[in-house]
Image: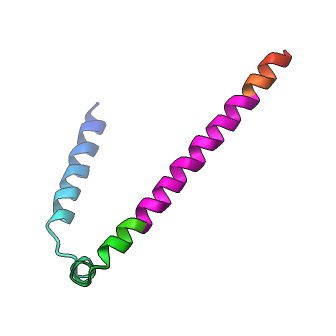
Amino acid sequence: MNKLLLMTMFLLFSVVVFAQQKVEMADTLRSNGKIYTVVAVCLTILIGLFLYVFLIDKKINRIEKEIGDKK
């Protein structure tokens, strides 16, 4: 329990430290209006990964059901 609490505290501390840093690349992308392109690409990749996992899960469930019916 102590290890989990300590790890959580370090994680939260690191998030606070990184949140206070100024990122020049993000400012440049935001000023040029390209940040929306970056966000759109990231969302497209994330949606694609979720869709892939969902379809694989459906296939695995179907195969498990077929195997269960044969036994």
Q: Is residue 42 left or right of residue 33?
A: right
Q: Quadrant of the N terminus?
A: top left
Q: Which residues are magenta?
A: 41-63
As for residue 9 lying within the magenta part, the answer is no
Tell me which residue sits at (21%, 50%) in the image: 12
- Residue 8, percent from left and from top: 25, 43
Residue sitting at x 65%, y 42%: 56
Q: Quadrant of residue 28?
A: bottom left
For the point 30% across and 74% down, the residue is: 35
Quarter of the figure that contains the C terminus: top right
- Most common secondary structure along the magenta stretch: helix
Left/right placement of residue 8 relative to residue 16 reads right
- When the figure is inspected, residue 2 is found, relative to residue 17, above or below; the finding is above
Residue 19 picture quarter: bottom left
Tell me how many marks there are.
Answer: 0
Q: Quadrant of residue 34?
A: bottom left
Report the side of 50 relative to 17 (left or right): right
- Farthest residue in the left direction? 20
In the image, what residue occupies the spot 70% across and 37% down?
A: 59
Point out residue 3 in the picture as x, y percentages from the top left corner. 30, 38
Q: Going by the picture, which residue comes out furthest to the right? A: 70
Q: Is residue 59 left or right of residue 71?
A: left
Q: How is the image coloured?
A: rainbow
Q: Is residue 44 magenta?
A: yes
Q: Residue 2 location, x and y as percent?
A: 26, 34
User: In this view of the protein, which residue sits in the foreground, 50 or 23?
Assistant: 50
In the depicted structure, whether residue 60 falls above or below residue 18: above
